[in-house]
Image: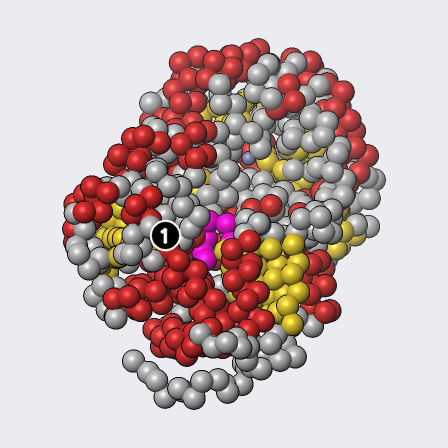
Amino acid sequence: MRHLLSTGDLTRDEAVLILDTAKELAQVGERSVKKLPTLRGRTVVNLFYEDSTRTRISFEAAAKRMSADVINFSARGSSVAKGESLKDTALTLQAMGADGVVIRHSASGAARRLADWVDGAVVNAGDGTHEHPTQALLDAFTMRERMGRLEDLRVAVVGDIRHSRVARSNVLLLNTLGAEVTLVAPPTLLPVSVGTWPCSVSYDLDEVLPKSDVVMMLRVQAERMNASFFPSAREYSRRYGLDADRFARMAEHAIVMHPGPMIRGMEISAEVADSPRSTVVEQVTNGVSVRMAVLYLLLGGAMQTTGNQGETR
Amino acid sequence: MTDTKRYLIRDTRVLGGERTDILLGSGRIEQIGADLPADGAEVVDAAGAIALPGLVDLHTHLREPGREDAETVATGSRSAAMGGYTAVFAMANTDPVADTAGVVEQVWRLGRDAGYCDVHPVGAVTVGLGGRQLAELGAMADSPARVRVFSDDGMCVSDALLMRRALEYVKAFGGVVAQHAQEPRLTEGAQMNEGVVSDRLGLAGWPAVAEEAIIARDCLLAEHVGSRLHVCHVSTRGSVQIIRWAKSRGCDVTAEVTPHHLLLTDELAESYDPVYKVNPPLRTAEDVEALREGLADGTIDIVATDHAPHPSEAKETEWGQAAMGMLGLETALSVVQHTMVDTGRLDWAGVARRMSATPARIGRVTDQGRPVAVGEPANITLYDPTATRVVDPSAMASKSRNSPYVGMTLPGRVLATFLRGVPTVLDGKIQ
Ligand SMILES: [Zn+2]
């Protein structure tokens, strides 16, 4: 594994290795001194063409906890805004000797293109409507922590599947890891070829909900409504929103996930979002551990961490 | 543009027939026969090569005026000659748009001055390709460029009433409307063929039905008003079926397919390399099969290149930002050989019809697309189908390099191209 561009590129063993490594590294976060020398001398560039403070901070924290040098390169106000191409930027990063580049970009495939142009490891931190692999990994990590397993876990992913890089990455990864995914959305928000995807599909949330161990709610953007993907926010909310009534019909052990930021009211009600069965906050915490694991494995840091290396599952 | 110099093409085959020699003089084919005496003519050794009528491309983008950094009329027509073409139709989506007699005359003159092939400007159907108001089609038809093909290519004439009017109006001067069939609302933001691959890559889809719906509509309109319709770059199986059906009803419709749609599929987008980004997009293997079948059985009348040069900065970028289009002139014949001749679907006479005679007829050009026969204009392409080559961008005559075939091994090589008896390419080199 040289880059992390798509969860579809991960074998089962590689995915499990990332999750196990994250588990070990997570213990660092519980120490009072949250710092390891693992990536000392390595340079990680956060190349963000799209604003996402949450994701950038998460990657930055992950890299710094392992003592890497971090350069934040925001497209806003930079030479990029003046029209410098991605390729020119890639050549600059190359010249700076970046060992790893974390890229967030509004164009699908931007991470893949960058990987063609730089020597360092490229981590896709979200490219257009394509993928967001570390989000899927932290979701899987969170599910495994909560539920104790991923095999045969029944996961419902609800909302704008068609435009969601999170959904795409999750379907591929969860399938690799043995979970059963059901996508739930109005037909307009499902990919046209969803029948070929390794998952089930339903238009009916009420039917899927009681059979699910995990319910992952996705962000629905207001512009989708304007483009007639569904008639109104009210109708969407009635048919696909997770309110208290629906929440009550979920299995007792089932959890609710959301990649954030949430639109409370429309896609998820406040009481559901704040319930102990919601993992929203843990997802953020786990995000740092998973990103540490990814950077560690890609940049080939020296494992001298917790003494807990033998742990496998 | 004739030459007093005479050329004797030694040892060729006309459309793959018997071995023969061809003597060219005064812009015409003077003699065809075995062992003709050189008699002062310059001898061109064509052993192994076949003599095809000079190719005619009904769909070329020359970019001048406006984007001379990508291509000019001169470089584009050189590129055409290298590919064996003796005439090209230059699409109207230049800057300014070729929507007036002035612009089409300018393009026509630039082509004549360059002298590598006949350049026939295509006139825009609507002012500025805006799709709102008919351009002065008659003025363009009456200009020295004698425009007969009208197209908003790059844009679809999506307004049904305007399309009807255009089809009706060009009847006055024997024109044809060449439609770029793309329902605009169904393809907003589209980046590639809508299907399994676009879903996997997270790129917005361009559904086949957006092409098919317009073609079906236009065929019915053309039938209703009794006009000629030409469908540009057909790319889907459904489009082939619709055109077959329309022809069976007696609709006067012709259609073209590009070499790249005969060979390449949307799977190539997996690399996110925008060299494969084109409009209409590369489709699936089933579409490719249907297009080959449609071209073989005559449902699709011609091969047209949709040669679309772009500078490297327009392609060495993210897929979503990249320009659509690929080069085609210098590889078209090889790709047609590879996909249609070497697979046994077409013989060389069939290729000559689809790449020379029929495009000339659709474009109402009388001195191109003629058979290789005594007394005919000496527009001839000598092509060696037994040669193979690895496509090398540095050897291309186009100003741009956005060819999807770079590094691919393709069959065949254009040895020489004669335009009215004058070689524009000789021994594979531009003259
Ligand atoms: Zn077009």
Q: Which residue is mark 1?
A: A258
Q: Residue furthest front?
A: A32
Q: Can residue A207 be seen from the camera position used here? A: yes
Where are the magenta residues, as a range? A127-133
Q: Percent x, y for residue A77?
A: 71, 48
Residue toward you, A240 or A195: A240
Write down the quadrant of residue A63 in the picture. Answer: bottom right
Q: Is disc 1 placed on a helix, strand or loop?
A: loop
Q: Is residue A242 left or right of residue B255?
A: left
Q: Amino acid at mark 1?
A: His
How many discs appear?
Answer: 1
Residue toward you, B280 or B44: B280
Classified by dominant secondary structure, the portion drawn in magenta counts as loop
Q: Quick check: is A109 in the magenta stretch?
A: no
Q: Percent x, y for residue A217?
A: 33, 49
Q: Residues within 10 Å of mark 1 (few under 14, many from 20)?
A: many
Q: Percent x, y for residue B144?
A: 74, 20
Q: Quick check: is A129 in the magenta stretch?
A: yes
Q: Residue at x 44, y 42 (%)?
A: B205
Image vertical order of residue A268 relative to residue A213, above or below:
above
